[in-house]
Amino acid sequence: MMNKAVMLIASVAAGVAMADPTVKLDWNAPKKEVAKDLWGIFFEDINWAADGGLNPELLANGGFDWQQNDHEKWDRLTDGWVPDFRDGGMARLSFQYGAPVHPNTAKHLRIESFGKGLAGVKNTGLDGMKLVKGEPYRLVYDVRELTEQDGIDWRLPAWTRRVFEFTFEGERTFEETGAKIVVGETEFSILVSGRRVMEFDNVSLLPTGPNLVRAGMRKDLVDRLADLKPAFVRFPGGCIVEEGDFQHWYDWRRTVGPKERRECIWNRWGSERIGDMKPYWETFHIGFYEYFILCEELGAEPLPICLSGLTCQYQRPSLMCAVEDVDYFANVILELIEFANGATDTKWGAVRAAMGHPKPFNLKMVGVGNENWDAPFFDRCEPIARIIRAKHPEIKIVGSSGPGPDDGHYKYAWSRLSKEYADIVDEHYYRDPAWFINSFRRYDGYDRAKLPVYAGEYACHHHVDKAKPNTQWSAVCEAVAMCGFERNADVVRMASYAPLFARVGHYQWSPNLIWFDGEKSWATPNYHVQRMFSLNRPDYTVGSSVEGEEKEHLFTSCGADREAGEIVLKLVNVEDGARKVVVELGVAAPKGEVKVTSLSAGRVAVNKPESPDAVAPVESSLAFEGGDRLSLDLGANSVTVVRIPAKGL
């Protein structure tokens, strides 16, 4: 990392060489108000982002509902459990469905022990597990013992739920009549003693203390999100909203209520196998209720995305309901609005209240469809939108312009998009560095009479050695486009990077904003750029231009923070070397401190588990003697935010 003094120096400009580019601020240009919800986040359950990520559950397949592989052979670690026979114990291990705790999650474990020792199963978590000494945990499971009725038929008594709260200081054994539950530092066992038959379901082992859990989720990951100060959260996707068939589409109604009623399904991204990666299932232990709670924790507006009557169009063939049947999917959205905003005496408002939140979530917007395109989509989303507007005109609708930013699907979408259907249009950009740099002026000539834009998914794909890592260069190029978003804030009202999370060794997609493993997480250069923009959102933007040699290598956005009384200037240097620039402020700034945040590194620099802060912003506070000119030295491949005190903004 470059020395602070070398990276960036601010002073009153004097004797500046003509070759230095000049940034000119124009306060007479039309001011463009910047939406308060410009910078947000997009969560999709990809790359083990929910189970194995935000979900703090330590056990894999605790409900035994994942589909078993290879005729239910018990040596398959992908299903979470393996045999555990001790002291000569032996048993028949099987999955059963009779008289379940709840029919939505009927599958449960049966242990038919016929040895004198201990026999059962062992779990080591999704990708290893580790309990922390001194931390509190909660163990929960449902259990019953069967008695013989006739031959190999069994009497199936009612289930009993066991709950244990404990602080972990070492291996713990919880005695159950005829069984033992053993909780170790890195593994968990259910063991039946002697000759008996017992069944178990809904086994859960969760940390509960504030060091590990925040808002019911993994604390370090929620902390990362909170540090971004997102204005909104789009959830739960993404392609997983639709899946490839109607057996697996993300029906929000199946993700709320007690966890035993939340039907486990195959995750759309679980089919994207890489090497010997484990398949991925959605337990919905983090469902729509939990997403709303997360939004409250972050102080962000919720933006749920809902199915529009057709499955993922990337999955061929895409399935779709008849146009005359789209009222079914419109009603699903109406029920969601009732769940979020309805009184406690309504059907779904009562469900929300029973879960512990009688106060409405104050939902203001919903997305209809995700990255869908052409007539099959618009023929269905338009009547859905009309039904929603008739019942809830106060709810804003987010539409879709398709999967790309400039292809035939995109052009067709804009030929059909109207205010009758949508209030804002979701555009997606997964492109190379050149595209992002060239997109700086993408919206300069945009027809202001058209619908505004939500840049709902974007990320610069910088190819390095046949991979797409989160490099400094990808972050710099994204910053160029983000300056373009901000300069055209009357068009681009919302924006969010994608994807948000990835667990090392279990990702189907890269690059990603935040990486993590079973114990820690780390930010990427792209994350730092997102945070720099989010924490330095101006109230309005003014004109800014660059003059001088190689001006095409410098990109800017400038605005004002009314409350702070500061000019907020963003500069992106796409050169591989440091450079000096002069800023003509256009107003006389008083003597005071200039606050500077800068991110600079080599193009292929990345953050890794062993060096998580190799690329990180440098903050400084510099003395400014006042005046209307400022000289700055910008680092190579850098993104810099300068906050300059000024009056009357």
Image (tube, rainbow, N blue to C red):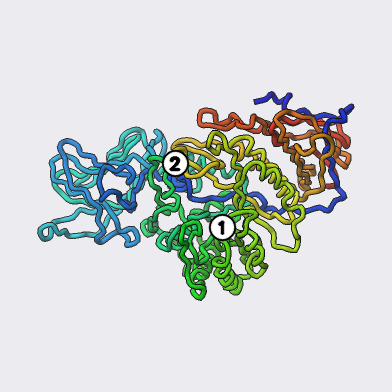
Name the residue beneath numbered marker 1. Answer: 371
Which residue is at the far bottom?
324
The residue lying at 53 percent from left, 36 percent from top is: 466
346 relative to 596, above or below: below
User: Callout 1: 10 Å neighbours few (<14), some, many (20+)?
Assistant: many
- What residue is shown at x 55% (from left), y 47% (from top)? 499
Q: Nearer the viewer, residue 476 or 524?
A: 476
- Dot 2 lies on which element? loop
**For residue 111, above or below residue 334:** above
Label 1 residue SS: loop
Tell me what residue is drawn at x 86 percent, y 38 percent. 584
Q: N-terminal of the two: label 2 or label 1? A: 1
Q: Nearer the viewer, residue 396 or 135?
A: 396
Judged left or right of residue 408, residue 49 is left
Q: Inspect this view and state whether residue 614 appears.
A: yes
Closer to us: 628 or 45: 45
**Quarter location, residue 600:** top right
Residue type at the position of mark 2: His
- Kind of residue at badge 1: Glu
Residue 581 as seen in the image, left or right of residue 72: right
Q: Quadrant of residue 565?
A: top right
Residue 157 position, x and y percent, is 21, 59
Picture coordinates of residue 289 (x, y %)?
49, 57
The image shows residue 395 at horizontal and vertical percentages of: 61, 66
**Residue 353 seen in this snapshot:** no
Dot label at residue 232? none
Query: To which residue does mark 2 refer?
Result: 506
Mark 2–mark 1 distance (CA, rounded to whole Å): 24 Å
* Quadrant (top left, top right, bottom left, bottom right) of the N terminus: top right
User: Is 2 placed above or below 247 here?
Assistant: above
The nearer-to-camera label among 2 and 1 is: 1
